[in-house]
Amino acid sequence: MADKTHYEALQVAPDASADDIKRAYRKMARKYHPDITPGPKAEATFKAASAAYDVLRDPEKRAAYDRYGADWDQPRPEPKPQSGRQSGRQSGPQWDGGFAFDERDVDSQMFRDFFGQRQGARSMEPDQHARIEISLEDSIEGRSLPLSLQMPQLDRSGHATMTRRDINLRIPKGAMPGQHLRLQGQGAQGGDLFVEIAFKPHPIYTIEGRDLYVVLPVLPWEAALGGKVKMPTPTGPVDLTIPQNARQDQKLRLRGRGLPGSPKGDLYAVLKIVNPPTMSKKARDLYQSLASEHGFNPRSKLGV
């Protein structure tokens, strides 16, 4: 492998599983998100982790990265034809409008028929498979997105060429990662087109099934005293009630605020207690007074 930068950004080994990569990204996001750990160093770490996750979460992008390193998304020179004529076949991933196409995305039987083994009558039409990355908001609102892809086509002389096709893809509300949308008759040669849904990494939310999670910073006195604080949701900010004596990493649920569906997903606020970056003398005196008056020892169970 020519480059390990993305693996190092997520602090995982090059042979890490997809689940390991997902867990590592969530850990990095909860630790270095700018809302949790302000500062240019944390922001740079978070951006590097997000960029790495965007590549390593996708099997095809990861395979290209493992093979080509930092230049994984660059066009590759077309191989010299072995038969003495130009095949018209494109090599390497083709990027168009956020949609990645690779001949591995297309049913192998279709390519065997198109590229030389057999061009006679076929018993069934070929299905085509593709993949598109959408935002969380695309799924929640159910948007229509333009989809551009390359499709194989035979010319009059029987040579296979790749032609561009633009499709208006309707994303249903509540579409989930891994879900396949079937577009009947929209594939090559009248077959069906199956489009797999994938989500782009979100700067605020993480997704588990239909549930959403957001790390919500709270100040020490907000956690101790309780009360209402503003928190984001995909449809706009709301007031969230923090209970008294709230704990670090405590989860507060907002029912039905996750992905649409039957049943609807929930939105979880994961509390992170954050100290203010600076403190006035009056504030330090108040903390000192609290320390003097309060006899609670949180380390008593440790024998100290």
Image (cartoon, rainbow, N blue to C red):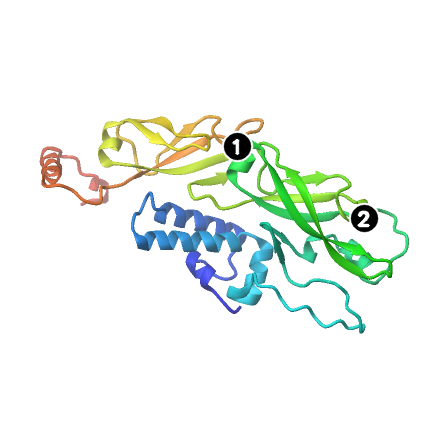
Residue 189 is tagged as 2
**Front in this rendered view, residue 146 or 108:** 146
Q: Vertically, is 176 above or below 122?
A: above
Residue 157 placement, left or right of 56: right
Residue 263 location, x and y as percent?
A: 56, 26
Look at the image and tell me in which quarter the C terminus lies.
Answer: top left
User: Residue visible at 43% across and 61% down?
Assistant: 8
Front disc: 2 or 1: 2
For residue 253, which quarter of the picture?
A: top left
User: Residue visible at 46% across and 33% down?
Assistant: 234
Q: Vertically, is 280 above or below 241?
A: below
User: Residue visible at 45% across and 58% down?
Assistant: 12
Is label 1 in a helix, a strand or a loop?
Answer: loop
Residue 38 location, x and y as percent?
A: 30, 47
First-in-chain label (2 vs 1)? 2
Residue 52 location, x and y as percent?
A: 47, 56
Give the amino acid type for the residue marked by disc 2 in the picture: Gln
Please tell me how crowded label 2 is: few (under 14), some (14-19), or many (20+) other residues with Cα within 10 Å.
Answer: some
Give the amino acid type for the residue marked by disc 1 in the picture: Leu
User: Label 1, on which residue?
Assistant: 259
